[in-house]
Image (tube, rainbow, N blue to C red):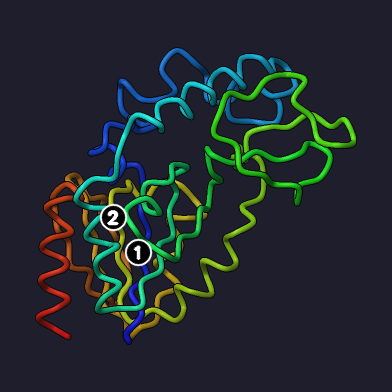
Amino acid sequence: MKKLIVLTGAGISAESGISTFRDSNGLWEGHDVMEVASPMGWRNNMELVLDFYNKRRRQLHEVSPNRGHMILAGLEQEFEVHIITQNVDNLHERAGSTSVIHLHGELFKVRSCGNIRDVRHWETDLYRGDCDAEGHQLRPHIVWFGEAVPEMSRAIELTMQADVFAVVGTSMQVYPAAGLIDYAPSTARLYYVDPKPAALHIPGRKVTVIAEPASTGLEKLRRDLLEKS
């Protein structure tokens, strides 16, 4: 089966009712980003950071995968599909996608401040005093600004094997994720699905742009892929 690698961003989850970071009513509303998404913010005001992610975690219980998520999961019948997502929700998995890399972490996971490898599933509120066995505070399993992106090397490796590489619902402004498209083989077909697509300049490469939301844009992508396969 041909390998379809898909980089997804906040736009695909927005159709499920999850606000995007960059919209005027986005998740950072009322907060400086460094207050709630940086190691410095965590040190300065742990309660604020915990409350911020507790609200995001509660919201995730109230939303469901949308048509875009379902289309990507369904494409596993025809392709070897790997999702590389910048999103911290679990909507791809809930839709049925079986290979998902979360570049920026996951809301339903926490980890120990004393051991980065001590990651555990967590679906309820997290508070000061929730600790590991050695007394280290647990924190959201989110990649904050200034932290390394542990899954990036695996994402690059997969992208280099792509027969088709598709970007869905992202502004292509957040690095290093936005640079993944540069690792796609010269033989790979490239697609970009977004209602307001950024201008991509990839010398010598054609990118098929579908300027629509994920739900309708991915339906067009699916038809195009099936016709050409």
| Residue 17 left/right relative to 5 | left
Query: Real-space Cα distance between discs 2 and 1?
Result: 7 Å
Residue that numbered label 1 is attached to: 6
Measuring from the top left, give residue 150's x and y in whole percent: 64, 56
| Residue at screen point 37% across, 59% down | 7
| Residue 157 left/right relative to 73 | right
| Residue at screen point 26% across, 75% down | 77
> Quick check: 10 above or below 4?
above
SS class, disc 2: strand
> Quick check: 75 above or below 121?
below
Q: Do the residues labelled 2 and 1 touch (CB within 8 Å)?
A: yes
| Residue at screen point 60% across, 37% down | 122
Which residue is farthest right?
134
Name the mark on residue 198.
none
* Occupied quadrant, residue 154: bottom right
Name the mark on residue 168.
2
Measuring from the top left, give residue 149's x and y in whole percent: 61, 52
Q: Could you tell me which quadrant the C terminus lies in?
A: bottom left
> Quick check: 73 above or below 35?
below
- Sequence-wise first label, 2 or 1: 1
Q: Which amino acid does label 2 sit on?
A: Val
Measuring from the top left, give residue 204's x and y in whole percent: 29, 78
Measuring from the top left, give residue 70's x and y in whole percent: 24, 56
